[in-house]
Image (cartoon, rainbow, N blue to C red):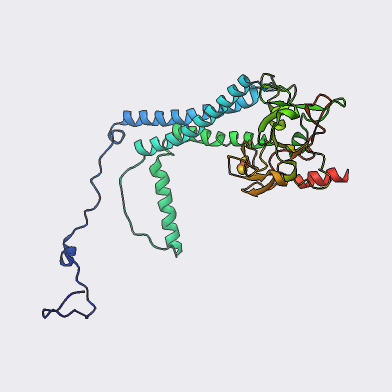
Amino acid sequence: MGNHSDGSPDTSGTVARAGQGEVDKFQDPGLPPHRLRLADTDPKAAKRAERQVAALFGISVVGTVVFIISYFAIDLGGDTSNATVRLQNTLLGLGTAFAMLGIGIGIVHWARALMPDHEVSELRHEIRTEEDRVAAMAIVDEIVEETGIKRRPLIRNTLLGAVALAPLPALAIFGDLGPRPDNALAHTMWAPEDGKLKRLSRDPDGTPIKASDVTIGSAFHVIPEGLNELEEGKLNEKAKAVVLLMRLDPASLNPSPGREDWAYNGIVAYSKICTHVGCPVALYEQQTHHLLCPCHQSTFDLTRECKVIFGPASRPLPQLPIAVDDEGYLVATSDFKEPVGPSYWERDMHERSNNNS
Ligand code: FES
């Protein structure tokens, strides 16, 4: 707001802006001059760029083929040794990377080296009439023409091949999800064999754990006795059977009816596989008796049978019923009473059918 010459404020409502009178003097600078690229003037360079683009699409095809071959040809067939799994994962990863990068870089190179690069600007208005629609379709046709895809069959064919094959890895991966994991997750190595209860042993050295080894506040990473890292082909079994063992003051536990004998003298064992999407629950907070999953911070309360008190997990961690044998070693009195692991599938149905049978 300005002032009158006598010093009183100007209340006319007009606002003076610095340099307002000069605005009209600025001219629209327009677009920078178009600079021709090598491929625009040299047919050999254009042909070379075309071959490069086709080669990149070809790399994508090769990447997809590598993925498919390594997926089907490396038959794990129960061989889940680290070396075999690592080899397969490496080839799957490389195949996917080359498949995606080949298409992506190929398209970028195609656009930069061969497609028309002159800049144009035009006013855009709403399409209302048939004439507008026809005009819009003509623009689309012109764009397709400018890409040169009709004139360059090498690029068109390799692009079609790369794009047609690219979804196959995704199909293979999703196909591998397979049927509902009822049986796979419902049974673990904790089930007694020939009436013999499995001892709880330290992960990874496999030494059995006595109840007297577990002091209040301590936590153990546990696997069934007889299963250790060195055994080939046991990775899946181990992944399902891993357990966390802790000892609390027995008075702080609140077992629900039917679970009164699942703990031994304040010692409790819970599946280590998070019920959200399966990360290992590895953090034990002694003071609060909380277990924390580092992936998405789901928090489970040990004093309330590992109920979820925070985070995206929707179910408590399954508890492993334990006792001690004649020699004082901790043993699992049975397998888990419910499937371990994530809840993305319909566990309710599984539990209902189990209860009905
Ligand atoms: S996997 Fe544990 S919170 Fe997500």
Q: Horizontal and vertical percent for residue 255?
A: 78, 45
Q: Horizontal and vertical percent for residue 240?
A: 71, 32
Q: 129 and 35: which one is in front?
A: 35
Q: Quadrant of ligand 1?
A: top right
Count of number-bearing discs: 0
Q: Residue furthest left?
A: 5
Q: Horizontal and vertical percent for residue 306?
A: 70, 44
Instruction: Note whether residue 192 is visible.
Output: yes
* Quadrant of the image occupied by residue 331: top right
In the rendered view, tell whether residue 35 sits above or below residue 221.
below
Q: 339 and 98: which one is in front?
A: 339
Query: What residue sits 81% from the left and 24% below the top?
Result: 327
Query: What residue sits 60% from the left and 36% below the top?
Result: 170
Q: 337 and 29: which one is in front?
A: 337
Query: What residue sits 31% from the left and 31% below the top?
Result: 43
Q: Horizontal and vertical percent for residue 144?
A: 42, 45
88 lies left or right of 24: right
Q: 126 and 232: which one is in front?
A: 232
Instruction: Note whether residue 69 is visible.
Output: no
In the rendered view, tell whether residue 277 sits above or below residue 62.
below
* Quadrant of the image occupied by residue 245: top right
